[in-house]
Amino acid sequence: MAAAKLRLACIQLAVGAVKKDNISRAVQKISEAAAAGAHLVTLPECFNSPYGTKYFSQYAESIPGETTAALKEAAKASGVWLVGGSIPEQDGDKLYNTCTVWNPQGDMVAKHRKIHLFDISVPGGITFKESETLSPGSSFTTFDMPNCKVGVGICYDMRFAELALVYNQMGCKLLVYPGAFNMTTGPVHWELLQRGRALDNQLYVATASPARDTSADYHAWGHSTVVNPWGEVISTTEADEDIIYADLDLDYVEKVRQMVPLPVQKRNDLYQVVKK
Ligand SMILES: NC(=O)CC(=O)C(=O)O
């Protein structure tokens, strides 16, 4: 990997009702992305289970468990950094929406539990209440690749600008959000939020969604996307299963920050986002 370059792959996975099939399909796609030269690969939110509160307890597993064992092996076999989307995690009597991150040696280097649960009610659109079954995480999650600190959030976490600002303050040049927006919010909010987070923080933002399955209860918006620090979409797709690639130039982060010097123009005497 050249010092300031990073080839990123976002897997828009077709997720069905059979957990074993979801896992083996994800493993196959990780190897396909690695063969195409990806250094960092990301899977979508809830990639081993249909997305819905009634499914989480049935598909949940502890970490380590069946799914994370497969992710560990896949990262090692393919020699890639892997943001393992998310899975329903069982820990004692609690369930979480959890992302694990793996290095090319197969070590788990980070674990993120979705901090902001997806509880919304849009009349005539969508009502969803993750908090019916899930508990929220309470930690920031970053990991260090040789040339890039990466911040991790899951889906609804992307709506909270403060989280991205904290990751920026921690030195991240890339934010990765496995996500699964829907047909009500996706068309207007999905890309706008990614471009907003990228522009606010002058860094790269990447998302990976499940492919849309119109026979499922939850219809994912799809449109896995990568946005650059200038706020431009540099890679995207529609709703079907796909892998998108983006070649990130990490020096470009600094260039944008020099051209439009927000970091030195912030009025920390008037306002501040504080990490607790
Ligand atoms: N699925 C989510 O967590 C978030 C989402 O779909 C939305 O914010 O809209």
Image (cartoon, grey):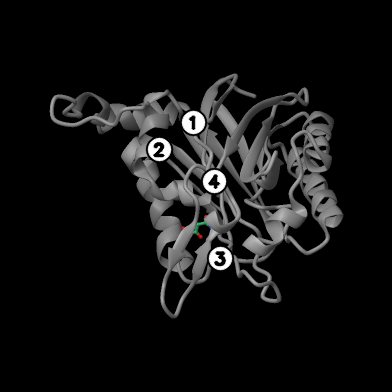
SS assignment at label 4: loop
Q: Secondary structure at mark 3?
A: loop
Q: CA distance from mark 3 to mark 2?
A: 23 Å
Of the numbered discs 3 and 2, the one sitting upstream in the chain is 2
Q: Is mark 3 within 8 Å of ligand 1?
A: yes
7 vs 158: above or below: above
Residue sitting farthest toward the front: 93
Q: CA distance from mark 3 to mark 1?
A: 26 Å
- From the viewer's perspective, is 232 left or right of 4? left
Q: Quadrant of the N terminus?
A: top right
Q: Residues within 10 Å of mark 3 (few under 14, many from 20)?
A: many
- Marks 2 and 1 sit apart, C-alpha to C-alpha, by 8 Å
Do tag 2 and tag 1 residues touch (Cβ < 8 Å)?
yes
Residue 92 position within the rendered picture, expressed as x and y whole percent measured from the top left: 70, 39
Q: Local crowd at mark 2 within 10 Å, few (<14), some, or many (≥20)?
A: many
Determine whether label 1 and label 4 are within 8 Å by CB.
Answer: no
Residue 154's disc is 4
**Disc 4 within 8 angstroms of ligand 1 (CB):** yes
In contact (CB < 8 Å): disc 3 and disc 4: no
Which residue is labeled 2 in the image? 163
**C-alpha separation, residue under disc 1 versus residue under disc 4:** 11 Å
Q: Amino acid at mark 2?
A: Leu
Instruction: Tell me the residue that label 3 is attached to.
Output: 221
- Mark-to-mark CA distance, 4 and 2: 11 Å
Q: Amino acid at mark 3?
A: Trp
**Residue 215 in view in this figure:** yes
Upstream in sequence: badge 2 or badge 1: 1
Q: Quadrant of the C terminus?
A: top left
Q: CA distance from mark 3 to mark 4?
A: 15 Å
